[in-house]
Image (tube, grey):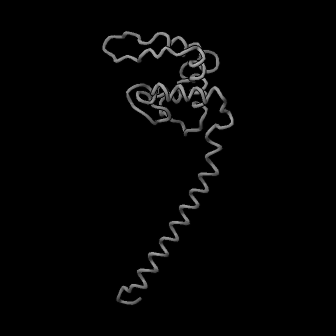
Amino acid sequence: MSETFTKGMARNIYFGGSVFFILIFLALAYHTEQTLPKRTNEAAMSESVVRGKLVWEQNNCIGCHTLLGEGAYFAPELGNVYERRGGEQSFKPFLHAWMKAQPTGAAGRRQMPQFNLTEQEVDDMAEFLKWTSKIDNFNWPPNKEG
């Protein structure tokens, strides 16, 4: 090898490295596009799930809660609340009762506000949280209570 580092050598390293990392990026992008649809639970998305997400967004639930690790860490993680609070048998009645009971008035705690959601909105929110719980998220959150 030459004892001097020439402009040609630098150019070859630059272009060779650029091509290498562009190929790596394209391979990773292709891999993501192939695996993501299998993990998102898109087939189970319904109109009520979409309406529930709209309720979630309009009431800024993510301003206090996290969902699949994203959001504020003030209130509990809701990515697995469907399983934590009864699943298919009792989640909807639980959510209806919980939303009607707000604020609970517990001393020493900040309270969840009363959003005055309709029965349909609470049902849609329940469907959204049910759909969210079925996403393959590599076992997030790490503990049952979020």
Looking at the image, which residue sits at the far bottom?
Answer: 2
Question: 86 or 109, which lies in front?
Answer: 109
Give the left or right position of residue 5, taking residue 19 as reference. Answer: left
Give the left or right position of residue 99, taking residue 43 as reference. Answer: left
Give the left or right position of residue 11, taking residue 119 as reference. Answer: left
Residue at image position (48%, 75%) is 15
User: Where does the image place residue 112, in percent across and percent down from the top left?
Assistant: 41, 18
> Image quadrant of residue 7?
bottom left
User: Where does the image place residue 136, in percent across and percent down from the top left?
Assistant: 59, 38
Position above or below: 16 against 103:
below
Residue at image position (43%, 80%) is 11
Question: 112 or 84, which lies in front?
Answer: 112
Question: 136 or 74, which lies in front?
Answer: 74
User: Where does the image place residue 61, in percent across and percent down from the top left?
Assistant: 46, 26
Residue at image position (65%, 33%) is 45
Position above or below: 59 against 17:
above
Looking at the image, which residue sits at the far right?
Answer: 43
Residue at image position (53%, 22%) is 84
Position above or below: 16 against 32:
below
Which quarter shows the N terminus?
bottom left
